[in-house]
Image (cartoon, helix red, strand yellow):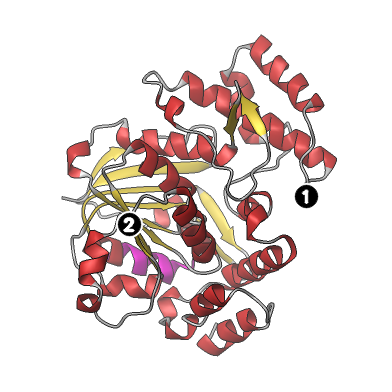
Amino acid sequence: MTHTNVENLLAREHVNMDPRLREMLDEFPKFRKEILPSKYWAELNKKALRQISDSSYENFKRTVARNYFTFIVTPWNHQTRFLMRSLPFSQAIGIIFGALFAPRHKLFKWYQSIYYNLLTKLLWAYVEENDPEHLLDRLSEPLQGNPPRVYQRKRLISQDLANSFLEYLSIMDTDVDKSEISTIMELGSGYGRSAYVHLVLRPDCRYILVDIPPALYICEKYLSDVFKDRKMFPFRPFERFDDIKDEYENADIIFLMPHQLELVPDKSVDLFINISSLHEMRIDQIRYYFKLMEKLTRKYFYTKQWKESKIPYENVIIRQDDYPINKNWRQIFAPECKVHDLFFEALCDLS
């Protein structure tokens, strides 16, 4: 897909959009081939832009978030089956009945509310069982974005919060030296679900979020509102790192687009994260980002992807063995993914 096609594809959507979002979309012509959105992502972006236009940013956790890692699946989905097997029978049955009679959610169909409630409650019960240090006590789903109201003991919970916590444990509850992790970069950060959990549980860390709009637009707006006391480096165009160096290095939360990563200093990231987005790219894009990640990362790399993924519109299948993981990296953690057993996880030490 050419620069012109991507620009035209996105520019046709919603003339009266927020100028901040338009400013971000105007960056697409600067992208080199390797980081242009795939055809699939171009279509997904169009869908997200329509959702923002129809339901507004204020409802993004009921609309746009469902394009990423918020699932509305049937009770016989592999996730639901895994969780049902993992919990005591009486607890699972209680959750099923609770989901049937819980309040319905606006912007959801009636059965979508039931499915969402069921998976969310099952997932939260599972993460509670896997939290011996009671870190979950420090987490509650922020109200920004109008999340579906599902409560556990008067605490607002969500699938995204539970999944992000499991991913956090996959990194931090392993053989890593936490004292060496002070700067985290996430490629494909979505609206910032993982960043929220890391920033709450590791408030001493700085977090760099990298994505394309409209995801980056939502993410910047969301985290700036949730973490009002943190220093932000909002997205902006720049040609040289020296032009923004002082503000960048003093910021707690940083927002970038992919074409700016080549300007970031080498080995300036302690932990590089990618969750559920590499598998939606072309293989040339995956190789490009792996090279860039290795250039930027001093210590750790964590990834979570489908074991096998067919890229819509591209007629390409990406399998686990296709990811160019360097044989010299020390593999710390590579089990089958919990709950999402069609995914794999890997945590590597690059040093």
In-front residue for pair 163/34: 163
Q: Nearer the viewer, mark 1 or mark 2?
A: 2
The residue at 53%/51% (across/down) is 308
Q: In the picture provided, is 34 more to the left or to the right than 128?
A: left
Q: Is residue 30 above or below residue 79?
A: below
Q: Residue 281: where, in percent of width, then height? A: 49, 65
Residue 121 within the magenta-colored segment of the rendering: no
Q: Please identify the quarter of the rendering in which residue 31 is found.
A: bottom left
Q: Which mark is residue 107?
A: 1
Relative to residue 294, is residue 62 drawn left or right?
A: right
Query: Helix, strand or loop at disc 1?
Result: loop
Q: Looking at the image, is mark 1 or mark 2 earlier in the sequence?
A: 1
Which of the pair 307/56 is nearer the observer? Answer: 56
Amino acid type at mark 2: Lys
What type of secondary structure mainly makes up the magenta span? helix
**How many residues crowd around disc 1 within 10 Å: few (fewer than 14), some, or many (20 or more)?**
few
Residue 77: x and y in percent read 68, 36
Amino acid of disc 1? Leu
Q: Report the number of discs.
A: 2
Name the residue nearer the viewer: 278 or 118: 118
- Residue at far right of view: 110
Judge whether residue 71 can be spotted in this image.
yes
Could you say whether the residue bearing mark 2 is in a helix, strand or loop?
A: loop
Q: In this view of the protein, which residue sits in the foreground, 294 or 225?
A: 225
Q: CA distance from mark 1 to mark 2?
A: 34 Å
- Expressed as whole percent of the image width and height from the top left, the position of residue 247 reads 25, 67
Q: Residue furthest bottom?
A: 4
| Residue ID at (72%, 60%) | 55
Q: Is residue 333 left or right of residue 77?
A: left
Circle 2 residue: 231
Magenta range is 281-291
